[in-house]
Amino acid sequence: TWTKFDHATAIAAVLSYKAIQQQDSVGLAVFDRDLRKYLKPSNAPAQWKTITQELTLIPKNAKTNTGHVLDQLAEKLTHRSLVVVLSDFFDNLEGIQQGLRHLRYKKHEIMVFQILDPQEITFPFEDVTMFKGMEELGDLLTEPRSLRDGYLEQLKEFTEGLQKLCRGMNIDFVRMNSGEPLDVSLSSFLANRAASMK
């Protein structure tokens, strides 16, 4: 099954490859509640292989603290950079905003990819379902039809809030559906971004 993690790592691999082909330096930061792995930016030919090897390591489902990690990253980056953040961003929006603001204060350009599973986007469940809690949350047996409208409204509000705070800091934001072909959605985004920068 193609997961959100697969989608995120594929995007990271593609963008890294494109950057190295242009002789730009590329690094990698892998995180949950803390920065777990940090590869310093480099444009050496071997850097892409190092990055892709790291991306094959599936992380534990630990709770994330995105804002805190973005703060850590802002202190590690010594040169102005393009920072691409790949996540579902199911985290505290205020903390995320503070972390993004820290990166912007340091003059970094930022691209935010919110990556969601198609089932998270449509919530198609009909029968009584056991939802397995990720990131240290418990399991929940429930009747999903009674939750659908409330869930979809919460997701819409959250995504709009994330999009609004990105727009307020001139950060590129795109929501990706991991069920859609990556070549089409990523190519479209990059083409639109290139056109807007001309």
Image (cartoon, grey):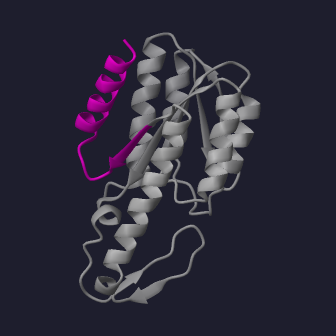
Which x, y percent locates residue 142? Answer: 39, 89
Q: Is residue 180 left or right of residue 92?
A: left
Which x, y percent locates residue 109? Answer: 56, 26
Residue at horizontal 57%, vertical 17%? Answer: 25
Magenta stretch: includes residue 177 = yes
Q: Is residue 108 visible?
A: yes
Q: Quadrant of residue 148?
A: bottom left
State the quadrant of the N terminus: bottom left
Q: Is residue 3 left or right of residue 187?
A: right
Which x, y percent locates residue 93? Answer: 59, 55
Q: Is residue 35 visible?
A: no
131 lies above or below 73 = below
139 lies above or below 180 = below
Which x, y percent locates residue 128? Answer: 31, 89
State the quadrant of the C terminus: top left
Residue at horizontal 53%, vertical 48%? Answer: 57
Magenta stretch: includes residue 114 = no
Residue at horizontal 23%, vertical 35%? Answer: 184
Residue at horizontal 32%, vertical 31%? Answer: 189
Q: Residue furthest right?
A: 75
22 lies above or below 171 = above
Q: Is residue 181 left or right of residue 100?
A: left
Q: How many marks?
A: 0
195 lies above or below 136 = above
The stretch in magenta equals 173-198
